Image (cartoon, grey):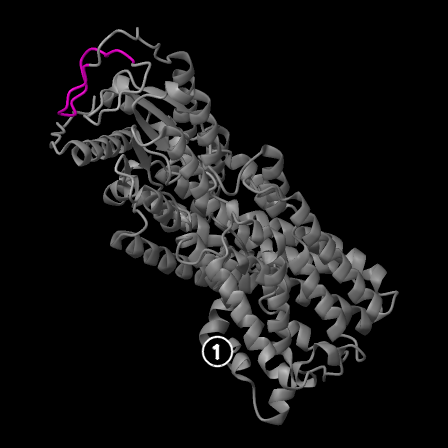
Amino acid sequence: MTTSARPLGQERTASAEVATGSIPVGGRHPRDRIEGLDGLRALAIVGVLIYHLDAAWLPGGFLGVEVFFVVSGFLITTLLVREHRRTGRIALSQFWVRRARRLLPALVLCVVTSVLIARVVSADLLVDVGRQMVGALTFSTNWLEITAGSSYFDQTAPQLFMNFWSLAVEEQFYLLWPLITIGLLAFSSRVRVAAAVAIGGGSALLMALLYVPDSDATRVYYGTDTHLIGLMAGAALAFAWASPRLARFVTPSHWGRFGWVAGPLAGIVLVTEMLLLDEQEALTFRGGIALAALATTVLIIGVIDPAPAATGGPTVLQRIARHRAATWIGARSYSIYLWHWPVILLVALDNPSAPGTLSHVLTRLWCVVVTLALADLTYRFVEGPFRTLGFRGVGARVLDRAAALSVPTRRGVAALVVVAAALVTGIVVTAPAQSETARMLAANEAAAEADEPSPLPSGAAATGSPSGQPSAVPSAVPTGLNATFTMPAGTDIDAYGDSIMVGSLAAMRYYFPGIRIDAKSNRRWSDAVTQVTARGDANRRAVVLAFGTNAGVDEDGVVKVLDELGPNRMIVLVNVMGPFSRIEKDNAKLEAVARGRSNVAIADWASAVRAHPEQVQSDRIHPTIKGAHLFSNAVRQALAEISERNTGKPVVLKDLPIP
């Protein structure tokens, strides 16, 4: 999931900047201040942060990105319209410089610091870091990652700056939208609103059309062309709000009784989506994201409505949005967004934990503390100075302070800067092309294809030990179904799976000599149906199935596989573990399907990982070498459970040393 997101680029002080223009907007006094927008940013960043801390806590928290997009579209368009009304023109160069000084200094600090720390923590965090840095510093992350074939939803290497994709979308909006706005300002307000609605609607439609169920959705999620709905919803609102004729249509106090409940209702819709939607559901890409953008637009309308203040004070929605805590978080939302994902990755690798454990909660709380501390420091000492003084002003201040230092101190600071630059350059040049996980999976897949065990003569006897200790000499492969539930030897077992099984290949062969494994990365339950059906009656008397990491558990697919294998085979379903919001739901599906089938048992990989979170790779999904033995032992225990259940005889599983 993840899942992803960002407040980037938005003007944390734009509330005041927009509200203090010299030209009235929507009939409002030029000195009116748009309050509460920082509160909406707070909602957005809290949603994104919770989602990235643990997707299961808020499955649709990634929709916080849509909130940022709508707010940015509204504020930037309002700024452009006001400038044009006030001066008769839009100074593009000044606009772009303002955007650069708002974004780049904090971004550069985050990138450089994160790369230096990541080198100490884990080389896996530096895979393709050069491309990531180029994308971050040129605001092209989304298209670079699409071109490189990266996946937002399925990664063997955690990307240090994965969350910067939304920064790229916003900056590309900042680059092109002023030019389009200049053209639209030659037309009436109705035409401007219609144009923004048409662009946003077309983008949402394109996302829905390009999305393919049960496939990787990175292209439609990252694409600027497919993810404009939020930015355009905000722009359309800004055009309407700036028009005296259209302003009443976006003012809840003019909507009658419904106006007073529209904002809270929109908030309920948005929060409900965050609680229920999943990053891999078709509904998310076929209306869910668009609905979140529309709900946010209505929330903004409720927040900016000036009528309640004039008639009796702000509404409950406005008071919540203007609360001091919400304003504090919203003001720092850009820096929070920059730091939170690198911090989560670094802390997770330095102190591994598994979802569903107390240590996981504690490490995630620590991530929040570190993120907020870094964000506050960045806001005070980087964002603030560059926002108020600009590049030249900050440069002049730095030179003035440097001049007051002693010569040795100045030389020491200069040397420190040079060393840091050299270190970052060296880290980028020597960064690995693949993560340890990717290398392991590639090697295991090659080994599986090159070293597939050959079937033994049908007349040979199976010699598995009921104690669970693998036979020293592989036994015969039965060609027909042997309907017995004694503890199987490796030669009695077929295993099918995805990259989790691939990662456990060597350990599975160690625990079950002679096992036949059919596994490849990125397989899904639909592939399980295909592979098991293709082998038909040649499937051995015990079958291990490990799918669900990719696209979740398809309950109908599981049932089809079990029905194909029949009630006379021992069947192990390995449950799922990883940083996905669907884990509990997926595992509940497996439990439900297995219930009532005496020949089926669950290998509890999820609980094994919770007890030993250090035994998964940096991607928090695939097993390490020790983790592969943990996986294999979970399978062995499930087979023993089936045997005991059906024979009434206990199975003693001897501990096997890790080679």
What secondary structure is found at the residue carrying circle 1?
Answer: loop
Question: Where's residue 368, x and y in %?
Answer: 38, 59
Rendered view: 284 above or below 122: below
Question: Where's residue 512, x and y in %?
Answer: 25, 21
| Residue 383: quadrant of the picture | bottom right
| Residue 613: quadrant of the picture | top left
Foreground of the two, 432 or 409 = 432
Q: Which residue position is annotated with label 1? A: 323
Position of 316 with respect to 651 (left or right) is: right
Foreground of the two, 247 or 172 = 247
Question: Where's residue 561, x and y in %?
Answer: 41, 33
Position of 388 with respect to 654 (left or right) is: right
Rendered view: 466 above or below 419: above
Identified at 25% across, 17% down, the residue is 513
Residue 404 visible? The answer is no
Residue 140 magenta-highlighted: no
Identified at 39% across, 50% down, the residue is 585
Identified at 44% across, 61% down, the residue is 377
Q: Which residues are magenta?
A: 463-477
Rendered view: 373 above or below 52: below
